[in-house]
Image (tube, rainbow, N blue to C red):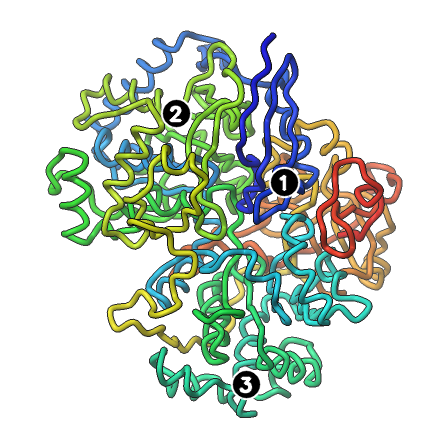
Amino acid sequence: MSMSSADTHCPYCALQCAMTVSHEGTTTVAGRDFPTNRGGLCAKGWTSAELLASPHRLRMPLMRRPDGTLAETTWDEALDAVAAAFRDTKATHGADANAIFGGGGLTNEKAYQLGKFARVALGTSRIDYNGRFCMSSAAAASNRAFGMDRGLPFPVTDLDDARTILLLGSNVAATMPPFLAHLAGARAAGGLIVVDPRRSATARLTEDGAGTHLQPAPGTDLPLLLGLTHIVIAEGLADRAYIEERTSGFDSLRRSVAQWWPERTSSTTGIPVSQLRETARRLAAGGAYILTGRGVEQHVDGTATATAAINLALVLGLVGREGSGYGTLTGQGNGQGGREHGQKADQLPGYRSIRDPEARRHVAGVWGVDADELPDAGIPATALLGELGGPVKTLLVAGSNVVVSAPDVDALRERLQALDTLVVCDFFLSETAELADIVLPVLQWAEEEGTMTSLEGRVIRRRRALAAPDGARSELWIMSELARRLGAASTWSTDPAEVFDELARASEGGVADYSGLSHELLDTGVEAYWPYRSEGTPRPFTDRFAHADGRAKLVPVDATPPAPTDRGGDLTLVTGRYLQQYQSGTQTRRVAELNGARPEARLEIHPATASRLGIREGALVAVSNERGTVKARASVTTDIRHDTVFLPFHYAGDECANRLTEAIVDPTSAMPEFKRTRVTVAPDATVPAARPAAHEPVGVSVAGGPVGRGSASTKEGLHV
């Protein structure tokens, strides 16, 4: 068999580590030098090729038969059935009875075409995607403050020279280990400050003089940030010249934080006043960056918290200057690009508002349709999922496993089963696909061409390294075939390069302008930071912000806690990730090495709390509230606060953490509350105790440099 190889990028997180995929009978991966990963990969990247030959791979369409089973069928039969369902649903119930739910792992081309398919082929406003559960609060805050949402408005390599990095709500040691190399400079200067209610693997990197771990009570990140801003202003640490020249709204902000004096902030958060003052002074000393992640954003006040982080950065004069900055760490592989080109309920390509008449005219012109025929803005993900089985009768899911990842999944499962037709595009039979009436097998990352946009706003090329298995098809081909069956207007290319060219034209003039890019140009290795018209923009805020007046907006926010909705729970559940698992686990739970390291969910609980409840290490426990019960093994550890417990969200069935989370959302971003759920924990005596859980390796050296698979530091390391 002939040898084939391709330079591409990892299929997992938004760091988009560069790799070379080679195929000669079997497929292997090797790290490739690139600014974000410098040749390193984490355990997920090193094992990514295993999925390409997985025996669990879907190779032919499946349809639900009268006896309730899923059975293989032909593509014609499957697509005819999908088209008929869409057509009949629209005729009987109206266009908005058809819905699309997309994913942050889709290529730019597929995300773009999915938004176009919803609005042109189906005429529905009902489209949103799982990025609503990931980046929506940070996006809303950045748009409000800066007029632009780009996760990192600077290259990730800028962090290398930082003296201080304040990292809130992100366990990067588990989520994107090669990123730790960019924290090495701050650690060497003693300036890594990690905010987390857990002593996570990332928090442990602050030990031995490398920085500070701030361990606030769950859900108090907003008061913490308000308190730090108060100290900065009260102690004369604010950059008054920068505030005057580059921002608006300072007087209102100053008044809004006046009530958060250090002692009050300390009593609310549990962080000593001395640490609060030390943190504020350190941030004001120069060379500082503030970075946020999902831990502070996945709340009903997530937009306010992200806004407070931005306010702190602006008052310190960090944003848009060389050697300092603010950014948010995008999670999913194409979480940035996936939200720019039409999957969000209220957006058209180029990060344009669907309610902007000029945007509608421009995009409709590219699509060759009448702007008046485009639907209005839809509703965000949690509300959309709430309509299933009611106003929404037919749903197509592409690149998402909502039965594991959405809040209150037991109620969602019932709504999915109440649909007339559920269609799922996936390469494995995920828990959501198991409920489908029709399952369409699609391509994996190494079998397709396309583009992704990384956490730093860089558009990169995904390249095909091997042929797809017989039977699997690209979503571009699926949408083209369905559009033809539905008699849809416009053109529906199956060539990713042609689709990208159309995307570039549609985005022209928008905030996320890709108009100067093409596959051909990207293949030259150009540094393609958007907006990219004739050249890239690695640091978009150097001269001005994206508002009409060029200024950033300081937006006062309140720290009024939301009304409690959970009753009877005495502990706060926070959810998060393991190093060896990813998102809903559809991929990683099928990789033997990864699943062997983390085969089950573990509930982290403090020894004092465990003793009070009669729980011992390795015992099976029941974690419950009014929505359901999760079974998990106990990991008794001082790495968690006594009032807090932790569950990973990668698992399904009885281990699914999102059986407990509530479908309440941030009023601005529609982000669900994933990180502050009241629960009770009790022993479950039906199953004997298991062996203690092993510490989780970080997979990088303590100095922060990436290491190879199988090296000593992947076997022993900091634990989560």
Up/down of 377 relative to 277, above or below: above
Spatial CA distance of label 3 from label 2 is: 51 Å
In the rendered image, which quarter is residue 420 located in? top left
Residue 181 located left or right of residue 17: right
Label 3 vs 2, first from the N-terminus: 3
**Disc 2, SS:** helix
On residue 232, which mark appears? 3
Which amino acid is tagged 2?
Glu
Up/down of 510 relative to 588, above or below: below
Can residue 601 be seen from the camera position used here? yes
The residue identified by callout 1 is 650
Residue 204 located left or right of residue 625: right
Which amino acid is tagged 1?
His
Q: Position of residue 336 (x, y in %)?
A: 43, 48
Label 1 vs 3, first from the N-terminus: 3
Spatial CA distance of label 1 from label 3 is: 39 Å
Q: Name the residue rendered at 78%, 44% in the picture.
A: 633
Which amino acid is tagged 3?
Val
Q: Residues within 10 Å of mark 2 (few under 14, many from 20)?
A: many
Up/down of 464 relative to 128, above or below: above
In the rendered image, which quarter is residue 590 located in? top right
The residue identified by callout 2 is 475
